[in-house]
Image: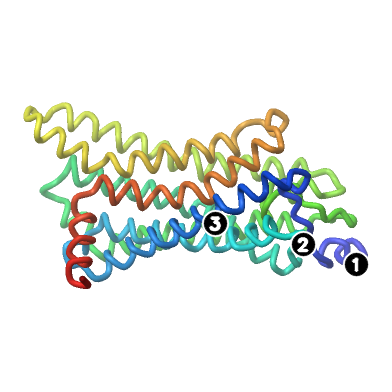
Amino acid sequence: MERNNESSGGDFILLGFSDRPKLEMVLFFVNMIFYFLAVAGNSTIIFLSLVDPQLHTPMYFFLSNLSLLDLCYTTSSIPQMLVNLWGPYKTITYVGCVIQLFLYVSLALGSTECVLLAVMSYDRYVAVCRPLHYAFVMHPRFCNILASMAWLSGVTTTLIQSTLTLQLPFCGNRKVDHFFCEVPVLIKLACVDTTFNQAELFVASVLFLVVPLSLILLSYGNIAQAVLKIKSAIGRCKAFRTCSSHLMVVIIFYGTIIFMYLQPAKSRSKDQGKFVSVFYTVVTPMLNPLIYTLRNKEVKAALKKFMGKTL
């Protein structure tokens, strides 16, 4: 009973870069700008996907899911981080930490985005390799099932990882050496052996990062073969444009996540982990809508059409 009380009471202190106040001020303004850009960009994509009939396709259905996902998990962590960066009070309540942990693990790392990106790569595979069957294969009901699988996988993962983490006794140690509550940093606070928790986290990382990435690589391997068989240079360019935006998002997302979670913990510096976490929490959701709007004619056309109507 005493152990449970030690684990479930009191506020946590989010240290961040509290020993470098000037760096914190720079990060505050940079992250605030990136956060507003991420909210504006992802909200725009969701709005355009809803109001423009030309974007009522499987590709933009999954893209709007990705934008909603980015909105949810940035909002679950960035406002609290901005508050802690701005002032001397760097605490978060236990309940707030639990909510942040469940949302962040479930949406950002709990396989939701990983599976969703794999689903989007399958959509691109069908579009390039089986264009005549695209409408039949990617019908709305099947798309809804795929999207639901992505979201439910995140919920399942977070119930396992977060529950195991929150059951650990912290023995009064509540100084979190990070900007937000995250599984790896909370495991380090425990005053018992955490070998099982670390092994479970690694297995989950392999399962929900490497497996979807393997499926993505398989899809793009088949896409590359199909593109090389196209004799027309214009046809090859069109096929490449169909996939380039999604491929760039995959490279940015998986590059940072794998760098953060699949390298040995002893080889990571504390500051390195913090900067990488900020990158995939703020920068990646901000870049995603820019990549899709700047490299996608349909989205740019929908945006121009809407702006023309309002002006």
Q: Residues within 10 Å of mark 1 (few under 14, many from 20)?
A: few
Which of the image's four quarters has the N terminus? bottom right
Kind of residue at badge 3:
Met
Q: Nearer the viewer, residue 283 or 197?
A: 283
Q: Secondary structure at mark 1?
A: loop
Which quarter of the picture shows residue 198?
top right
Disc 2 to disc 1, how far (Cα)?
Answer: 30 Å
User: Residue 48 placed where, x, y %?
Assistant: 27, 65
Q: How many marks?
A: 3
Disc 3 to disc 2, how far (Cα)?
Answer: 18 Å
User: Residue 21 placed where, x, y %?
Assistant: 73, 48
Q: Residues within 10 Å of mark 3 (few under 14, many from 20)?
A: some
In the image, residue 114 above or below residue 141: above
Q: Secondary structure at mark 3?
A: helix
Q: Residue at x 68, y 58 (%)?
A: 86
Q: Which mark is residue 44?
A: none
Question: Which is more N-terminal, label 3 or label 1?
Answer: 1
Q: Which mark is residue 1?
A: 1
Q: Which mark is residue 32?
A: 3
User: Residue 195 placed where, x, y %?
Assistant: 76, 40
Residue underneath mark 2: 89
Kind of residue at badge 1:
Met
Question: Which is more N-terminal, label 1 or label 2?
Answer: 1
User: Is residue 291 left or right of 268 when viewed as pictured?
Assistant: left
In the image, residue 128 above or below residue 100: above
Q: Residue at x 57, y 55 (%)?
A: 157
Q: Residue at x 76, y 48 (%)?
A: 18
Q: How is the image coloured?
A: rainbow
